[in-house]
Image: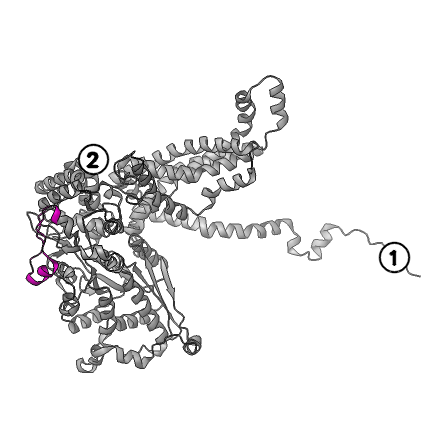
């Protein structure tokens, strides 16, 4: 865990400023808030986000505020968020802290915070807003004002940001996901890999079916650099593969009614049988114990030729491995008989009901979701976060690097956990229990695809029949 | 002329009557001295235990007080294949590692009890696995078992003994074996040091007498040393079983119960269900399944200790 303790108490502000600590004055904040904040008058005196006009109320002085998020795989984004929290704290006399936790540790920590306190703002991953609904502050007014200002919610965010009629967190998007690959190795294996610039110009991506991908993997593994995929107990990469592969072979947790389990489908059984065979022929077989960082390390160490991941591998390559950065590109998840999918729901920044500083938390969010702060945060991660609001889809950031092209298309194939049923606490429970991920791990370990899928279906029945 | 009057002794009853300071009363002082301990036990042991007990018989979720269900959580768990697998894993984990720890600890103690060079330094060094925080040493094991950068895999590959990296934490059998190896490494010094203390209580005269009677090293160990250290070994074993059953950190850091729940033990599964899946009532029930086993062991331990005292 990393944490930042920001000195910003009432008594020490002047001394800190005198010592040369960078300090954001209210005047500066007012300027940097940008056009959106200035538009407050034009849009009337609406509540929440749009009410923010550059400075928090004086009553916040001397209070504390702590945020909790998952660690960033693009460290520049984490550093900036930490700095933004510090800036806001210093400017408003609030003792503001930013904490970050490893991905698998985030949810237990939030659960503990709900029971025992300690955090004001927490980052919820898709589905958690349903699990913690009774413990979250209603932010509907702020979110609706924000959506109205920024062109509405993207479809993937609209699907799961709202719990019933309420927004219990403000959506800030989701980390991206696509198939990362080494251009030269895939070409050597016979794939018709387009040049990244041409791909971005024509929109013609490397279009693979799962079968083609496995066949390609066989040649890649024979050449010494297999496909890499995590199936450990981790909440990023393992489900990012497991759910799309299931959906693209006609299976799902539940039908649209949210009750009828539709997991044990013949087409899916056949597909998992293929995966079991391919695991030996095409994959790095140690993937069963990989977590979210393992494939990043393996790709950057030159041990694997392709893996499903966000653009964090590319960001690290640009910084430290320029030869790999020049030889890599991304394409969309392979497609199956039932289509092409990506696991995609929005994360939200939520305020806990047991926070001792709900007013401060709302003020911070109102400030942070202004164009300046949110835009800087998006830009520094160079596309690693898919924004939840439509306005940002047109941001010039997306056209800057053709290697990032595939990510700009991800929202069009995104489905949330629980699809075709609605995302809710049951899909969140299945996700937290790794039911879908473990189905694959069991099949690979035992070689019994049908038995593993039956196990998964039984587990889902137990969850969805409650 | 000054005279010294000799004061007659004041009877205790008169002291009390004169308003003796309450702290001079043994009974009051005893109660006062026990109070901090009782408070600590109440706040940090009894309250969480009874809260856990209550949660386990409710359908509580995080942030939502539940309804009383009776023993339904416990019954439902019996029908949960992951729980059954977790119970099996826990028994295997504890019952395989403890004998290894005992045997290795006994050997370690015998070596440390012998007259070896730098004995004190070696004694301090072997305690390291037990002293280093488990979270830290588990990270060391995580590096050793790393699927991509394991130094063990690297060495074996470079010696031509294996063709690919070893799948330490990814294959069903190897994963539980790997976490057990790490547990044995961590737990052996506990046995070593405890048994060493027992060995030092063995009078040298007994060994000398046995040697004069013609007993060899093995017979002296079997008939002189073992009977004296049996009590220590028994207590260490019971303690170790309890600690191994209730393990959490090592497994959580190495595998989080994966792959496919092959390394879940009661502690990690309770954590996953209670805090990640937010079903805190059922999570408490999973954790409490350990209770009868640990309670029996604790009773055995206490009875043995009391017998010793008697």
Q: Chain of mark 1?
A: B
Q: Evaluate whether residue A283 shows in this view.
A: yes
Residue tagged by mark 2? A446
- The image shows residue B74 at horizontal and vertical percentages of 30, 41
Residue B92's place in the image compared with A440, above or below, is above
Nearer-the-camera pick, A168 or B121:
B121
A428 horizontally vs B225: left or right: left
Residue tagged by mark 1? B4
- Write down the region rendered in magenta: A187-209
Residue A368's place in the image compared with B260, above or below, is below
Which quadrant is home to the N terminus of chain B? bottom right
Q: How many marks?
A: 2
Q: Quadrant of residue A325?
A: bottom left
Residue at 37% over, 58% down: A116
Q: Are marks 2 and 1 in contact (CB under 8 Å)?
A: no
Q: Disc number at residue A164?
A: none
Which quadrant is home to the C terminus of chain B? top right
> How far is disc 2 from disc 1 in space, using C-alphas?
98 Å
* Closer mark to the observer between disc 2 and disc 1: 2
Q: Quadrant of residue B83?
A: top left
Q: Residues within 10 Å of mark 2 (few under 14, many from 20)?
A: some
Nearer-the-camera pick, B261 or A117:
B261
- The image shows residue A438 at horizontal and vertical percentages of 22, 43
- The image shows residue A364 at horizontal and vertical percentages of 30, 71
């Amino acid at each position: 865990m990393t944490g930042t303790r920001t000195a910003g108490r009432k008594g020490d502000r002047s001394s800190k400023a005198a010592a040369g600590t960078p300090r954001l004055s209210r005047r500066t904040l007012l300027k940097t808030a940008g056009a959106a904040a200035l538009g407050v008058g034009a849009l009337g005196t609406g509540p929440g986000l749009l009410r923010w006009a550059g400075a928090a109320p004086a009553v916040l002085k001397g209070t504390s505020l702590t945020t909790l998020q998952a660690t960033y795989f693009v460290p520049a984004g984490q550093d900036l968020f930490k700095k933004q929290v510090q800036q806001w704290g210093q400017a408003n006399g609030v003792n503001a802290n930013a904490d970050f936790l490893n991905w698998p540790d985030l949810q237990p920590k939030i659960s503990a915070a709900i029971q025992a306190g300690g955090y004001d703002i927490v980052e919820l991953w898709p589905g958690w807003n349903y699990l913690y609904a009774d413990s979250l502050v209603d932010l509907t007014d702020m979110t609706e004002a924000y959506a109205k200002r920024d062109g509405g919610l993207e479809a993937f965010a609209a699907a799961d940001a709202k719990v019933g009629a309420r927004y219990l967190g403000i959506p800030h998007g989701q980390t991206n996901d696509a198939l990362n690959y080494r251009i030269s190795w895939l070409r050597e294996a016979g794939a018709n890999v387009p040049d990244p610039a041409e791909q971005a110009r024509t929109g013609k991506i490397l279009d693979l079916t799962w079968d083609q991908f496995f066949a390609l993997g066989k040649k890649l593994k024979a050449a010494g650099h297999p496909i890499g995929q995590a199936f450990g107990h981790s909440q990023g990469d393992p489900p990012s593969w497991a759910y799309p592969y299931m959906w693209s072979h006609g299976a799902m947790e539940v039908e649209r009614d949210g009750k009828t389990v539709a997991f044990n489908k013949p087409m899916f059984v056949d597909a998992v049988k293929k995966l079991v065979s391919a695991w030996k022929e095409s994959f790095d077989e140690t993937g069963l114990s990989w977590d979210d960082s393992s494939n990043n390390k393996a790709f950057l160490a030159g041990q694997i030729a392709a893996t499903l991941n966000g653009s964090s591998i590319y960001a690290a390559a640009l910084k430290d491995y320029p030869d790999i950065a020049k030889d890599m590109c991304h394409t969309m998840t392979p497609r199956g008989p039932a289509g092409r999918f990506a696991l995609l729901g929005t994360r939200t920044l939520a305020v806990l009901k047991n926070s001792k500083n709900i007013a401060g938390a709302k003020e911070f969010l109102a400030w942070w979701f202004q164009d300046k702060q949110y835009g800087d945060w998006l830009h520094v991660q160079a596309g690693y976060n898919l924004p939840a609001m439509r306005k940002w889809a047109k941001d010039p950031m997306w056209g800057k690097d053709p290697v990032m092209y595939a990510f700009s298309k991800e929202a069009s194939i995104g489905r949330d956990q629980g699809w075709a049923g609605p995302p809710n606490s049951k899909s969140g429970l299945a996700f937290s229990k790794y039911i879908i991920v473990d189905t694959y791990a069991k099949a690979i370990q035992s070689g019994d695809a049908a038995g593993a899928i039956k196990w998964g279906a039984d587990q889902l029945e137990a969850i969805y029949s409650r | 002329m000054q005279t010294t009057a000799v004061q007659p002794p004041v009877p205790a009853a008169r002291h009390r009557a004169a308003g003796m300071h309450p702290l001079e009363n043994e009974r009051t002082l005893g109660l006062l001295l026990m109070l901090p301990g009782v408070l600590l036990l109440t706040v940090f042991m009894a309250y969480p235990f009874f809260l856990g007990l209550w949660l386990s018989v409710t359908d509580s979720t995080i942030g939502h007080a539940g309804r009383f269900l009776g023993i339904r959580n416990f019954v439902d768990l019996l029908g949960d294949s992951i729980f059954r697998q977790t119970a099996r894993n826990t028994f295997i984990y504890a019952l395989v590692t403890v004998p290894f720890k005992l045997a290795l600890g006994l050997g370690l103690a015998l070596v440390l009890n012998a007259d070896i060079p730098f004995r004190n330094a070696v004694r301090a060094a072997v305690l390291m696995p037990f002293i280093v925080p488990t979270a830290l040493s588990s990270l060391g094991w995580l590096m050793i078992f790393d699927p991509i950068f394991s130094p063990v895999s690297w060495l074996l590959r470079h010696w031509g003994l294996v063709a690919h990296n070893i799948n330490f934490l990814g294959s069903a059998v190897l994963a539980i074996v790997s976490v057990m190896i790490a547990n044995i490494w961590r737990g052996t010094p506990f046995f070593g040091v405890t048994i060493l203390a027992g060995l030092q209580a063995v009078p040298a005269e007994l060994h000398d007498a046995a040697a004069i009677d013609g007993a060899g090293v093995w017979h002296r160990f079997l008939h002189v040393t073992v009977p004296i250290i049996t009590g220590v070994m028994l207590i260490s074993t019971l303690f170790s079983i309890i600690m191994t059953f209730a393990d959490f950190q090592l497994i959580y850091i190495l595998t989080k119960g994966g792959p496919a729940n092959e390394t879940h033990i009661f502690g990690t599964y309770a954590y996953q269900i209670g805090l990640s899946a937010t079903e805190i009532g059922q999570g408490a029930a999973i954790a409490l399944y350990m209770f009868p086993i640990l309670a029996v062991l604790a009773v055995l331990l206490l009875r043995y200790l009391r017998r010793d005292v008697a």
